[in-house]
Image: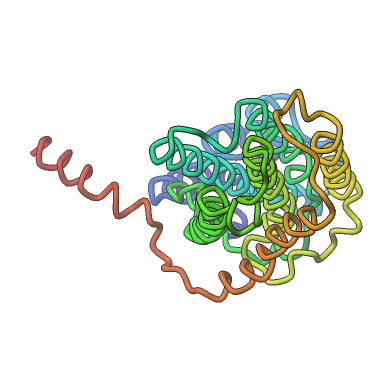
């Protein structure tokens, strides 16, 4: 909305009216009279050269070059930060849900867990530190400017994120639980005279396949809504470096740190199987993105009963 030849009070009234309607409001100004509107808005942008000190103090962002084109950059980077946070949350929740379900189901059914505490610590390192660096540093793209603004009451976890999360987590849980319960038969390890070694090989494959799933799914998390999750990936050197660094560390852990992580060395066939299990997440993500999702956020269906109870109590 553009207002011409308007008084500062008109600006303030418009901002208040828009905010009451639930809109997120940004205001630009440079004079002392603009201070109330800048302060009332969700985001106030003042001019760094021509702007008065009062306007600067009342604003959230100061445009140092007094160029309105910089506002576009602010919006571009703001949307990029928001989108990167969503990517990381989707990736993090997928890892958490899969690891939790796998260990809980295995513990209840057999009394033992395939992923021990040291292995889970390594997975958490991938998920929290390295995953955050890889996904939270994605540069802004032109597609961000074609999106509709995010409403004040819209949930951080969208329906698209729930869909992607459930598809990937369900796949990981299904495959790894099958390996946990039937892995000795599938891998032809029942004939191994050393049953303890066979059991460790099975659990090592589960751990290795789980990590491979996270590495492949990290690419999927880059583009939650787009089919091509590889677009621009070669230009993000930090992302590619972190993926390579994580893969090298995983090889070192499996092949040389067996005593520390309670794993055994895997032959090349089991490594290919682990990579193959992780690779399936790519075509699965493409198929999943063809599934339509409702526009109404899922969380609204769960919050409606609470709102009705509150309304009846207030009445």
Q: How is the image coloured?
A: rainbow
Query: Is 155 on the left-hand or right-hand side of 193?
Result: left
Residue drawn at x 62%, y 58% is 4
Q: Quadrant of residue 282?
A: bottom right
Residue sitting nearer the eye, 34 or 107: 107
Using the image, determine if residue 108 lies above or below residue 171: above
In this rendering, does residue 192 appear at all? yes
Residue drawn at x 47%, y 51% is 23
In this rendering, does residue 78 appear at all? no
Residue sitting nearer the eye, 287 or 181: 181
Using the image, determine if residue 143 lies above or below residue 119: below
Q: From the image, which quarter does the C terminus lie in?
A: top left
Q: From the image, which quarter does the N terminus lie in?
A: bottom right
Residue drawn at x 12%, y 35% is 314
Q: Position of residue 31 (x, y in %)?
A: 69, 35
Q: Position of residue 18 (x, y in %)?
A: 45, 50
Q: Position of residue 163 (x, y in %)?
A: 50, 61
Find the residue positioned furthest to the front.
193
């Amino acid at each position: 909305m553009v207002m011409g030849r308007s008084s500062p009070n008109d600006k303030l009234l418009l901002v208040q009216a828009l905010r009451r309607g639930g809109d997120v409001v940004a205001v630009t100004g440079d004079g002392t009279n603009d201070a109330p509107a800048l302060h009332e808005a969700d985001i106030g942008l003042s001019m760094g050269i021509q702007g008065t000190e009062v306007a600067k103090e009342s604003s959230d962002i100061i445009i140092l070059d007094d160029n309105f084109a910089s506002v576009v950059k602010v919006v571009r980077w703001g949307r990029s930060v928001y989108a990167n946070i969503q990517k990381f949350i989707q990736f993090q929740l997928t890892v958490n849900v899969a690891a939790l379900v796998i260990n809980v189901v295995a513990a209840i059914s057999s009394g033992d867990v395939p992923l021990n505490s040291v292995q889970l610590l390594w997975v958490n390192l991938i998920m929290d530190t390295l995953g955050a660096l890889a996904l939270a540093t994605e540069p802004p793209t032109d597609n961000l400017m074609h999106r509709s603004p995010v409403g004040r009451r819209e949930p951080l976890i969208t329906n698209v994120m729930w869909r992607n999360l459930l598809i990937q987590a369900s796949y990981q849980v299904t495959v790894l639980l099958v390996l946990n319960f039937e892995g000795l038969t599938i891998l032809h390890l029942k004939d191994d005279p050393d049953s303890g070694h066979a059991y460790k090989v099975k659990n090592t494959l589960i751990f290795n396949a789980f990590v491979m799933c996270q590495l492949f799914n990290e690419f999927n998390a880059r583009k939650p809504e787009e089919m091509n999750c590889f677009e621009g990936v070669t230009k993000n050197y930090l992302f590619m470096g972190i993926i390579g660094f994580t893969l090298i560390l995983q090889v070192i852990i499996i092949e040389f740190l067996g005593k520390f992580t309670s794993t055994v060395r895997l032959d090349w066939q089991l490594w290919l199987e682990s990579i193959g299990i992780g690779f399936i997440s790519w075509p699965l993500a493409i198929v999943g993105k063809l599934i339509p999702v409702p526009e109404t956020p899922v969380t609204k269906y769960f919050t409606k009963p609470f709102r009705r109870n509150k309304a009846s109590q207030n009445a």
